[in-house]
Image: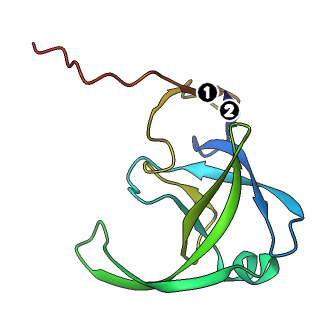
Amino acid sequence: MITGIVNEEFEPIIPISLCDSDGNVYTQDAIIDTGFNGWLSLSPDLISQLNLKWKRRGRAILGDGSECVFNVYEAVLVWDGNLLTIPIDEADSEPLVGMSLMEGYQLIVQVFEGGYVELSKIAITTDRVKI
């Protein structure tokens, strides 16, 4: 289980732990962004500090309909006690946790300043309930 808190701007925040190129672990707060279908985004400064490996260019359509081209890096993340190698999208923003990283988890957010945030792993089945 991963836990966090809702900040004064009503953003759900969780700590993320990333490994730099030498294997040192750094912990950073990140905003959960359910509108972001990627894995994780980091600022150019943090990517440089961690000395992450460049992989490719990415392309996305933003909420306003404009297109964005960005660099994609690779990082090792400590996620719910496991090491995961994931793509990192470069973005001039606070670190964002996307829906791809949260796949297979349930998100609970108490939407008030200081509210509780919880990500817990769920069992995924192929049976779907139809209403």
Q: Secondary structure at mark 1?
A: strand
> Which of the pair 111/56 is nearer the observer?
56
Seen from this angle, which residue lies furthest left?
131
Residue with the mark numbered 2: 2
Look at label 2 and name its amino acid: Ile
N-term mark: 2 or 1: 2
Residue with the mark numbered 1: 118
Where residue 2 appears, x then y in whole percent?
68, 32
Look at label 1 and name its amino acid: Glu
Residue at figure coordinates x 69%, y 56% from the top left: 77
Instruction: Indicate left or right for 121 with 76 as reference.
Output: left
Where residue 87 appears, x then y in whole percent?
53, 67
> Which of the pair 5/16 is nearer the observer?
16
Q: In the picture, residue 130 is in which quadrant?
A: top left
Residue at figure coordinates x 66%, y 32% from the top left: 113
Instruction: Indicate left or right for 92 with 106 as reference.
Output: right
User: What crowding class fits label 1: few (fewer than 14 Cα within 10 Å), some (14-19), or many (20 or more)?
Assistant: some
Quarter holding the N terminus?
top right
Q: Are marks 2 and 1 in contact (CB under 8 Å)?
A: yes
Establish if 84 lies above or below 114: below
Establish if 37 lies above or below 119: below
Q: CA distance from mark 2 to mark 1?
A: 6 Å
> Which of the pair 115/13 is nearer the observer?
13
